[in-house]
Image (tube, rainbow, N blue to C red):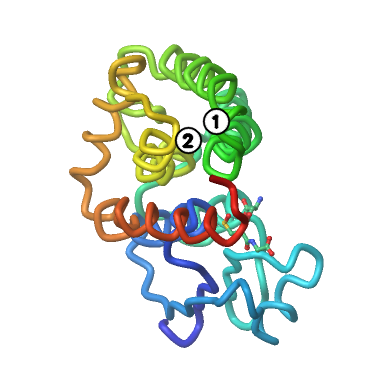
Amino acid sequence: MADEVLLLDAKVSMFGMRARVALAEKGVKYEYKEQDLTNKSPLLLQMNPIHKKIPVLIHHGKAINESLIIVEYIDEVWKGEAPLLPSDPYQRAQAKFWADFIGSKVHEVGKRIWVGKVEEHEQAKKELIENLKQLEEVLGDKPYFGGDTFGFVDVALIPFYKWFYVYEKIGNFKVESECPKIIEWAKRCLKRESVVKSLADEKEIYEFVLGYRKKLQLD
Ligand code: GS8
């Protein structure tokens, strides 16, 4: 199997972590290829010629691009184990909506903290907290966004938990004091082997971001 599945990825990437968590949930063996995004490999350029971004899943030589599409693909191909998307069409649509919200809102606003100038931080922090509070409402009293089982939205969001450390250090605030339910949910997810072994270390992410900010002279 290992020669059939290949993941082009970068360790600290929240999008790459989504693919890794989904593969681990399904117990899929794969070959991991760390990519240097400052000097993109011919393989990455060939496999994602449109966006030239990681993650890229290569299955039997064919490329699948975009993290949420990759997670859905993994869910469809390895159907038997741990279903991630609900089978009910409305629930499925809802799961896709919130997973997209995480990329278009949480990620974008988080980026305004970690690549943003200091004067942009206050507004970005406010919006990030608003977005996370919306997600807390979606979670409600369920253990996971997927209900009783870990699902698509859980996979989409959990990598960002490791990025909270960066948002908090750079933005000088604590997510937990504003959104305790999200932190409780994240700690629950972190009890899963698939999650623990797939996520990058927060200090490593922070070091990466500090280097990035230094290079761009943002401080
Ligand atoms: C985003 C992937 C992405 O931004 C997805 O897969 O969900 N919507 C896509 N990948 C980044 C690394 S993570 O921040 C990337 O590959 N960047 C390289 C570049 O922009 O040149």
Whether residue 99 is visible, yes or no, is: no
Q: Looking at the image, is 58 positioned above or below residue 17?
A: below
Q: Earlier in the sequence, mark 2 or mark 1?
A: 1
x then y, percent, for residue 106 = 55, 31
Residue at the far right: name it.
50
Residue that carries the numbered disc 2 in the rendered image: 153
Quarter of the rendering containing residue 155: top left
Residue 210 at what x, y percent from top left? 45, 54
Task: Judge by depth and name the residue closer to the eye, 28 or 155.
Answer: 155
Q: Residue lying furthest left in this view?
A: 191
Q: Residue at x 41, y 61 (%)?
A: 23
Depicted 177 relative to depicted 49: above or below: above
Where is ligand 1, by quadrant? bottom right
For this view, does 149 lie left or right of residue 102?
left
User: Is 26 located above or below residue 35 in the figure?
Assistant: above
The reply to whether dot 2 and dot 1 touch (C-beta < 8 Å) is yes
Q: Amino acid at mark 1?
A: Ala
Mark 2 residue type: Val
Task: Identify residue for label 1.
Answer: 95
Quarter of the figure with residue 145 = top left
State whether residue 68 appears in this view: yes
What secondary structure is marked by label 1?
helix
